[in-house]
Image (cartoon, coloured by chain):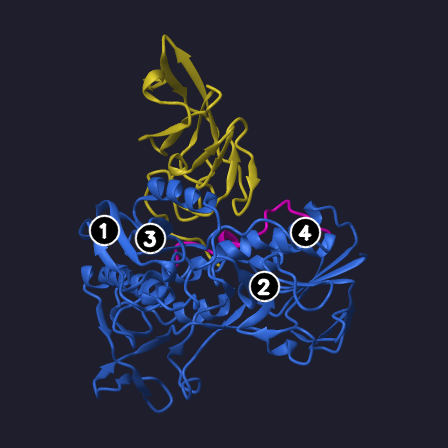
Chain colours: A blue, B yellow
Amino acid sequence: MRTVAVVGASLAGLSSARALRSQGFDGRLVVIGDEAHRPYDRPPLSKEFLAGKVSLPDIALEADDEELEAEWLLGVRAERLDQQGQQVVLGDGRRIRADGVVLATGASARSLPGLSALSGVHVLRTLDDALALRAELESGRRLVVIGAGFIGAEVASTAHQLGLDVTVVEAMPTPLAGPLGTEMGAVVGGLHADHGVRLLCGTGVRRVVGAERAQGVELLDGTLLQADVVLVGVGAQPNVDWLRGSALELADGVQCDSGGRTAVPHVVAVGDCAAWYDGRLGGHHRVEHWTGALDRPKRAVATLLSGDSSGPEPAPAYFWSDQYDVRIQFAGNAQLADSVRIEDGDPDERSFLAVYRRDDDAVAVLAMNQPRLFTRWRRSLAAAPVTAPVTTSATASLTAPVTATR
Amino acid sequence: MLPVCPLSSLAPGEALRVEADPPIAVFHTEDGEVFAVDDTCTHQDASLADGWLEGCEIECPLHASRFDLRTGQVDAPPAKKPVRTHRVLVEDGHIFVELSADEPNLPPGVSVAGQAATGGPL
């Protein structure tokens, strides 16, 4: 393999470039990124960076002395992958011929229809998004956050800390029920009320009110929330449209086996744009977590260089969130669980560890401010043998309530 | 010299956070060696004493950066800077740490006083 193109220059793309070099690839390495910036870390964008506590150099992902001998084509979008996956066509007309391609184009923030024209309405995904939002987070202003997921909750926490009056609106009856289950979703969602941030659940948004600039958010039940700034945090969609017309299998992300191999030879996919087969869930599953973008490229690059995608099941998904000075950590798959139990600490104290089980087997673990205990549980989850789910549908219990016991 | 604890009270494989400024993490490896480094990961604010000790390597509990306890060098990203190491002395069954005179590599936003520092310009 003489030339490898990595399409995507964020954590998954950089990790792929690093893995290529560390696994002995010494050919031409081209990294293509649609943002003009060198790789930077996204998690601080809703936290320390948004709060102005850290600067752009602080969140750079590359070390000062790092040299990958790569050609960086930044600020240019990949527009097409040809049928055989051997040519990447760029937005400026250039064509990059490659013997191997790593797809790492990530995801984009979803918005709500009809909102983009109003100023004062933001999404948060990129550095530029964060700079635009940060410029508007002035003390005393009213912020309405649409969506109580992790991004929404972190922005609410940061804005509250900056002195804004914050209201969070969530369409589902419980925040974070998908990733955490309803019981623990309610516990984590309770952090808002601890700090006087309003959380309104079970009501969708009808529209954002305002002529040129947002002035309020009208809910489906008719409630009008006054707003100077609106953040839409309603999830992300994989950046795979540019791949339509290629021979790749696309659904919610590029369909891959459990080693990152796609339907096209010499093309692998990693990070938020990729849906790897997950043996624990028994289906293809997109992992939108930072840790997946850090770890999985090693495996995908091994697949690319060797042609062999076999190997152990990747470690269970892991993510963290920092809200209101509480560190939340989670590993595993809550949707596989039929029970969740507090094993240590007390949710009311915002310091506890909960273990999700299916029958007697631990399938996930959640912690608030319990990093040491969490690390041990996360390790044991990763070491447990992988068994496919028993039910025919891996998502059968996705939103079903799980019973908390003490 | 900072007295830490009796060696017998820190089992092999275990770690201890020592409240200093900045805090220090002391590790007793499975092989019986004792190491001390700054407790705060150089990437982001997390306690390395809460991490996963394997051989002479500590893995950060938050983002899995790995550091070599003998040298402080980064063995795995996302950390970009080494963690400062301190000399350890075990005398009469007691662990002592000699604090390094080097500058610590604390993560952005964390200052020596343990409080969030204000960020620099973009």
Of label 1 and label 3, which has the lower sequence position?
A: 1
Kind of element beneath mark 1: loop
Q: CA distance from mark 2 to mark 3?
A: 47 Å
Give coordinates of residue B78: x percent, y percent. Answer: 53, 47
Distance of label 1 from label 4 (alpha carbons): 41 Å
Query: Label 2 vs label 1: CA separation?
Result: 37 Å
Image coordinates of residue A150 in percent, x first then y, are 36, 64
Residue picked out by circle 2:
A37
Furthest residue toward top? B92
Q: Name the chain letter of the residue that bears numbered label 1.
A: A
Looking at the rendered image, the disc whose residue lies closer to the viewer, 2 or 3, is: 3
Of A110 and A134, which appears nearest the observer?
A110
Chain of the residue on which disc 4 is drawn: A
Residue that mark 4 sits on: A302
Q: Earlier in the sequence, mark 4 or mark 3?
A: 4
Q: Mark 2 and mark 3 in contact? Answer it, CB < 8 Å.
A: no
Amino acid identity at mark 1: Arg
Reading the chain from its start, which is encountered first: label 2 or label 4? 2
Residue A56 visible: no
Q: Which residues are magenta?
A: A52-69
